[in-house]
Image (cartoon, rainbow, N blue to C red):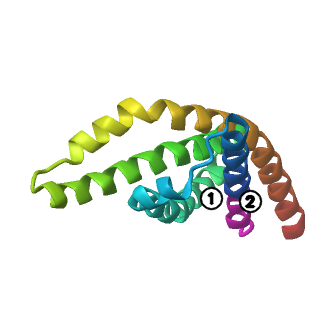
């Protein structure tokens, strides 16, 4: 089960590739100006992905041992929740920064704004990544579990 960290990292990487390809297909690859203007959001997202990956690793190692047959459900939930947690981590950080900038608590406004305007995008990406990536991740987790069981006998 030590391999779960690398499996999660691999499927996060596939998710990032999927996101880049999707944006390339619809012609929405961000320009340098957009990245420069929203640099706090970009940095927050980049920092949040490994943090959420660690949480997903802890979740998977905890529930894989308990739930013997529910690999797909656990994999789907871990990948889907990663997208939602990334969104709210970004909203929380932006809300805290805006609170200092505008001398007014703006955390709830930030959470509400991100929920209204971006939750559906992150939700759709999370569902697609959860279904496709969760299927393949569950297969690898099941094979990994079987190999580990054979090695201990």
- Foreground pick, 37 / 94: 37
Reply above or below: 123 against 39: above
Residues in magenta? 1-10
Q: In which quarter of the image is residue 49?
A: bottom right
Labelled disc at residue 61:
1
Along the line of sight, the residue nearer the viewer: 21 or 120? 21
Q: Quadrant of the rendered structure where residue 2 is?
A: bottom right
Residue at point 59% right, 46% down? 78
Quadrant in which the C terminus appears: bottom right
**On the picture, is 92 further left or further right than 98?**
right
Q: Is disc 1 placed on a helix, strand or loop? A: helix
Image point (60%, 50%), residue name = 63
Which residue is label 2 attached to? 10
Residue 141 position (above or below residue 3): above
**What residue occupies the far left of the structure in this picture?**
103
Q: Where is residue 47 in the image (x, y as percent from the top left)?
A: 48, 65
Q: Where is residue 119 in the image (x, y as percent from the top left)?
A: 45, 34
Q: Residue at x 46, y 64 (%)?
A: 43
């Amino acid at each position: 089960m030590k391999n779960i960290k690398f499996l999660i990292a691999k499927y996060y990487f596939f998710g990032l590739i999927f996101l880049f390809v999707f944006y390339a297909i619809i012609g929405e690859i961000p320009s340098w100006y957009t990245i420069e203007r929203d640099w706090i959001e970009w940095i927050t997202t980049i920092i949040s992905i490994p943090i959420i990956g660690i949480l997903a690793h802890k979740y998977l190692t905890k529930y894989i041992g308990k739930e013997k047959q529910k690999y797909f459900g656990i994999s789907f939930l871990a990948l889907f929740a990663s997208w939602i947690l990334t969104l709210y981590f970004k909203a929380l950080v932006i809300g805290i920064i805006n609170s200092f900038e505008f001398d007014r608590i703006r955390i709830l406004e930030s959470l509400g704004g991100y929920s209204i305007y971006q939750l559906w995008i992150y939700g759709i990406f999370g569902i697609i990544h959860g279904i496709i990536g969760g299927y393949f991740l569950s297969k690898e987790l099941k094979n990994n579990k079987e190999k580990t069981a054979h090695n201990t006998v």
